[in-house]
């Protein structure tokens, strides 16, 4: 009997550990059952304009506290096996996920069981993660340590590899480098327009100088 009791206790501890792994980082109010997570993922992918990489799904759902890494891996595998999502290979070998017709039907038929605020939060954060990925591919930021500080080089290349603008700055410390990098990544178009307007002496030379209020990078 004692051995049985020890075994039961061990089983319970394993169960608790598994629960903690699959709920770590998940906020109150997030989907809790397998079906709810499946429906939420189908809803998110149904609202994505393009196939979504795992990194962006993971970033968006974890940052919103709705689904953690282990839940995401397991649920994507199950949805793929059921034929609700289509998995393809991206340009750099990464897996891309796209909603299948049966997954779209699931999203439309059953996601009313999930609160609207939860669904919209998941879509918003995943779209934001996709925008961050796209923005990071559209500009270049290089930070190089020099003798008395840091050299920061900002660039906006075009499709041919020629830079619309390439600007190098000297900054004395890493904190200022981080601020400049963040500002540039969040709104490179506004910075480009501002520099061109100052150099040309005309605030309308490249369009209205209105900063983008959306902050993609913190």
Image (cartoon, grey):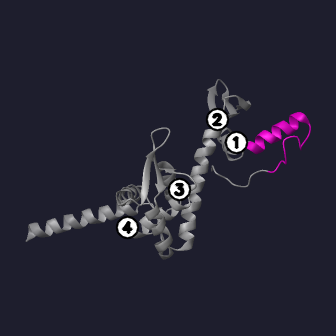
- Crowdedness of circle 4 by 10 Å Cα count: few (<14), some, many (20+)? few
Closer to the N terminus: mark 3 or mark 4?
Answer: 4
Query: For the residues marked 4 and 2, what is the alpha-carbon distance in whole angstroms?
Result: 41 Å
Tell me the quadrant of the picture where the N terminus can be found. Answer: bottom left
| Residue position marked by numbered label 4 in the rendering | 34
Q: Are marks 1 and 2 in contact (CB under 8 Å)?
A: yes
| Residue position marked by numbered label 2 in the rendering | 141
Q: Which mark is residue 184?
A: 1
Look at discs 4 and 2 and give the one toward the viewer. 4
Residue most extreme to the left: 1
Residue 68: percent from the left, percent from the top?
Answer: 43, 58
Q: Describe residue 93's horizontal placement relative to residue 216 as left or right.
A: left
Query: For the residues marked 1 and 4, what is the alpha-carbon distance in whole angstroms?
Result: 40 Å
Residue drawn at point x = 69 percent, y = 55 percent: 214
Query: For the residues marked 1 and 3, what is the alpha-carbon distance in whole angstroms?
Result: 22 Å
Q: Which quadrant of the view contains residue 69?
A: bottom left
SS assignment at label 2: strand
Query: For the residues marked 3 and 2, what is the alpha-carbon distance in whole angstroms?
Result: 23 Å
């Amino acid at each position: 009997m004692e051995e049985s009791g020890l075994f039961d206790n061990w089983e319970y501890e394993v169960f608790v550990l598994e629960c903690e792994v699959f709920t770590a980082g998940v906020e109150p109010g997030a989907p809790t059952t397998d079906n709810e997570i499946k429906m939420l993922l189908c809803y998110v992918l149904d609202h994505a304009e393009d196939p979504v990489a795992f990194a962006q799904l993971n970033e968006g759902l974890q940052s919103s506290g709705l689904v953690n890494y282990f839940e995401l891996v397991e649920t994507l595998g199950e949805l793929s096996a059921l034929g609700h999502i289509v998995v393809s290979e991206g340009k750099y070998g990464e897996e891309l996920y796209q909603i299948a017709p049966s997954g779209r039907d699931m999203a439309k038929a059953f996601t009313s069981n999930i609160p609207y605020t939860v669904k919209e939060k998941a879509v918003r954060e995943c779209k934001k993660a996709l925008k961050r990925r796209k923005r990071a591919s559209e500009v270049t930021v290089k930070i190089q340590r020099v003798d008395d500080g840091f050299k920061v080089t900002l660039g906006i290349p075009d499709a041919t590899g020629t830079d619309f603008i390439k600007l190098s700055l000297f900054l004395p410390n890493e904190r200022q480098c981080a601020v400049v990098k963040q500002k540039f990544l969040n709104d490179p178009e506004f910075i480009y327009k501002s520099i061109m307007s100052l150099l040309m002496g005309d605030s309308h030379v490249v369009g209205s100088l209105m900063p983008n209020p959306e902050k993609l990078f913190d």
